[in-house]
Image (tube, rainbow, N blue to C red):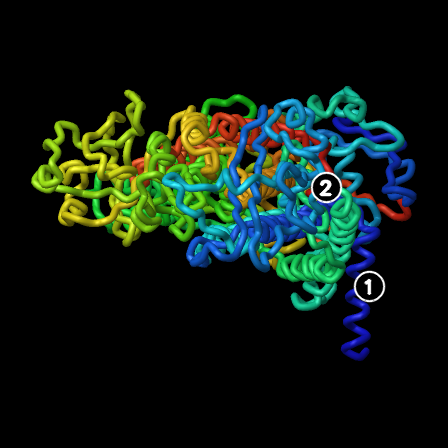
Amino acid sequence: MSRLRRLVALVRLGHRTTSAERFGVGPGVVLAVGAFLVVVTLLTSWGAWNVIRARQERFEARQIEDIEDIGSVDHGVLVTSRDVAVGDSILTIVAIGSVRGVVELAPGIDRFPEVGEMVVSPAIRENPEVATSGVLPYRDTGIIADEGLVTPADLIAYVGVSDVDFIEPGGREPFRFEGFGRPYPNPVFSPALMAFYDAFAVLIVLVGFGAVIRAAVRMSEALQSRRLAALRALGLTPAQLRVVAATRGLMWCAAGSIAGGALFALAAPRVSRVPFTNISYFPADVGFGWVPAILVAVAVPVVSASISSFPSHPRRSGDVRQRKAWRTWLAPVSLLALALVPLLPSGPSTTYVWWAAAAAVFVSVGVGTTGLIQAVGSRMGESAAPAVRLAGRRLVDRAGANSRLFTPLGALLLVALVAVPVARATNADARQSGIDLLGQMGRRVVSVQTTSHDLNLFGEHMLAVAPRLASYAPSGDDFYGGEVLVMTCDQLHGLSAPCPTRPAYVPAPDGTNSTHRVTVRAARDDDYETMEPAIVPVDLSRHPIDQLPGMVVVTPDMLPRPLSDYEFDGYTVFLDTSPDALADLQTQVARQQPTARVVSTIDNDIAYASILLPVSIGSTVATTLLALLLILAIAIAVMSQAIEANRLHAPLKMMGSTPRFATRAYLWQMLPPATIVATISIVAAVLTMRSLTIVWRAPVTPSTTVAVYATAAVAGIAATAVAGTRFLHAPLTPELLNNE
Amino acid sequence: MEPLLVASGVGHGYGSVSVLSGVDLEVHPEEVVGVAGRSGSGKSTLLHILAGLIVPVEGWVNFDGRRIDSLPELDRALIRLGRFGFVFQSSGLVPEFTALENVELPGLLLGWATPVARARAMALLEELEVADQASKRLAEMSGGQYQRVAVARALVHSPDVVFADEPTGSLDETSADLVLSALLESSKRRRAAVVIISHDREVTRRTDTLLTLRNGRLW
């Protein structure tokens, strides 16, 4: 027989086992479901990423030209925008003044509105709250086309206003903007951050994919080990067996992949809203294409078949496994190291030390947990109770199988408990473009922009002074970045001001008599790598040094020692938030300068939210998908353990042991390791969040919802384990007693 | 003497394939009954039915005056645990346990005190000349030692019937002789009947009653 004909014969054999074998349907369906989920996940992730990028492009397309491009008042357009809260919605009103020369139109409109006219998004017309709010007292003359909107639910209006509204305080001629289409922000995320998210998404999919496929293959092996053994006994070589196994995997995964691809192809053009959320998007932004869909649908089965073709070879039951004592201590030592990290002296290296310890902990959860399970199993193996002893021996002997089962459980718990709080914390911090994801980021960036100044201030009550800055500002540069001026008392005295009794001030606008108390996080803004934030209290009150409007005045004693070495330097100030910060700001701004533009990323800010929110949702969705995939993998692994336990218990059934004995042995085999893993994961999660809170100086706290999900997942897994005992109570099948 | 184990009109099959048909069999106390037959003739199936491992499609099985084929699985399990012993070709022991732990297991499951179970197990291992293997796991033993441990476990609780399915099938001639002698002599000492299935002529030669399965029937 030629090699080709032999190969064809093997493929046909694999095909026959797919369609006919008694035990092949179960694991085959699992493979198909796994492939289905993976294909849907891959295509959804890919589509979500397309949507995020498209929304960014749509958002950038309608931004006005940057201030650096403005050098003249002779050409360009007078334009400003502001966000107005209408009920629970934020409405963006772009005020357009007169146009001089050639100006790039805003996307989605074919002309600028004349004074008194407005062009609105479809969502505004459909929003009764906006119509009755009176915020748009203009004549509706047209609708903004899709290309001018970020989402179908975008609430934006271009309104024509008189140039009088743009006159600067003091009667200065306002600057004009070149037009629309400025990249904004520039960039929102650093390339490293984007790469991180890309890698994270890919990792999530691959981990989930691998876990599901591996578990399915494992279950398949447990169910049909005898069948494969029979084929091997017939003379098939391991390579030929791999062809048979790969064919099986290919067939089932192809079915699942095609179903997943078809579902996505049907749903993608029709769905314009993320289920269970208010997030909408244009289906065209998903960028569905047949080529990538086919590629994914082909690649997934091929990869699955490759994994299937290398079935693991579990240790024969009864093989004596030597326990490695050092593994027992790996997890506790790593957890201890993680607990001690926050005690390390503050310094630039802390972050790296923390990451090193965290990496050790995460590795230890995989490696060290196995050692701990074996150690506990070893103790159990000396028990007088036969069921406990049997379970203990199996925990020691079958460390690989246990690891495959419990490592995903630990990963699931860690992901559930840590990932979302960390994502929330980093998302809350990720307000400043170009700053490293994991480190020192501002809290709630607020941009205050007038027609003549582009002020990026960070914080809340500081915003109250923002409109005032416009009247004081000699130039835009003076007020860039919300800098802290670090001064000595002498210098303050040199400015004819008394040495402050308070360590810091936030100058308040005239007439403001605020007694709010806020927290300042000050850090050098020219070197974020070595930045050491300081939390300091700041009283809001009118400061006598009116020559320093908009500045937070900080004395050196306030700052950490590395920072206080600089007498004069620029520091970025981050003020913590308060619930009414945005409302305060909008009120102050509206009162003092109607044309001032306030862009806030506080929760409902359209600008940053257009990018951050999908990323946040994407992270949550990806985490959820990963959790689902891991739960599926764990459930499959639990079932495969139960099936295997049934086989292992066959001799005991034969000699007359009761189902109770088998159940006890199985549960003793499952529950102690599950408890160990859950304990380690929870401790690791708590320590991780505690360390992050200290190292980042940002609260990383457990999410109640996530904790509930995690608990439910663990309960579900426990229920699965208990349900798996049904396999143990199945009648004894004579073939299980056949000689191995 | 009243038969201890009686099968009457036993029939069984797998799917559409009939394996046994109208099988009648009696096993008397202390009797050694051999069942021979070609591969696939239904020998193992018959043994499983006699031992209450599976329920026949037709006929009935009576043990010590009690029909066991109609009993619930749990009751049959308790009979297997207390009244039967098993020796299979190369399976049947718990691989995670040592030889001693395997042999003491029936006693522990029957509720014996651990020292009692251990002492009886050890005594039997010594009787079968595998006491030096007591602390070893099965994977560390030879085939002959494994089977003698299996014999010890089958006999430790002094069963009424020992079922042996090809107990020497995977052994060389010398080892097979040792195991067979151990099985038959120790069973005789404990007044246990033996139902033994084998191809081995030496085995069948040493039985009190030899039956042959052919075309699903005993001859």
From the image, state whether disc 1 or disc 2 is nearer to you: 2
Instruction: Indicate the amino acid at tag 2.
Output: Gly
* Residue ID at (64%, 27%): A130
Q: Residues within 10 Å of mark 2 (few under 14, many from 20)?
A: some
Tag 1: Cα neighbours inside 10 Å, few (<14), some, or many (≥20)? Answer: some
Amino acid marked by disc 1: Arg
Nearest the eye: A661 or A61: A61
Chain of the residue on which disc 2 is drawn: A
Quadrant in which the N terminus of chain A is drawn: bottom right
Q: Tell me the CA gap for discs 1 and 2.
A: 65 Å
Among the 4 quarters of the image, the one containing residue A129: top right
Q: Residue extending furthest left?
A: A490
Nearest the eye: B137 or B186? B137
Q: Quadrant of residue A458?
A: top left
Front position in the image: A481 or A383: A481
Pinpoint residue A321: horizontal percent, then vertical percent: 45, 50
What secondary structure is marked by label 2? strand
Q: Position of residue B85 (x, y in %)?
A: 64, 34
Foreground of the two, A145 or B160:
A145
Which residue matches tag 1? A12
Q: Which residue is mark 2?
A: A142
Q: Is residue A209 visible?
A: no
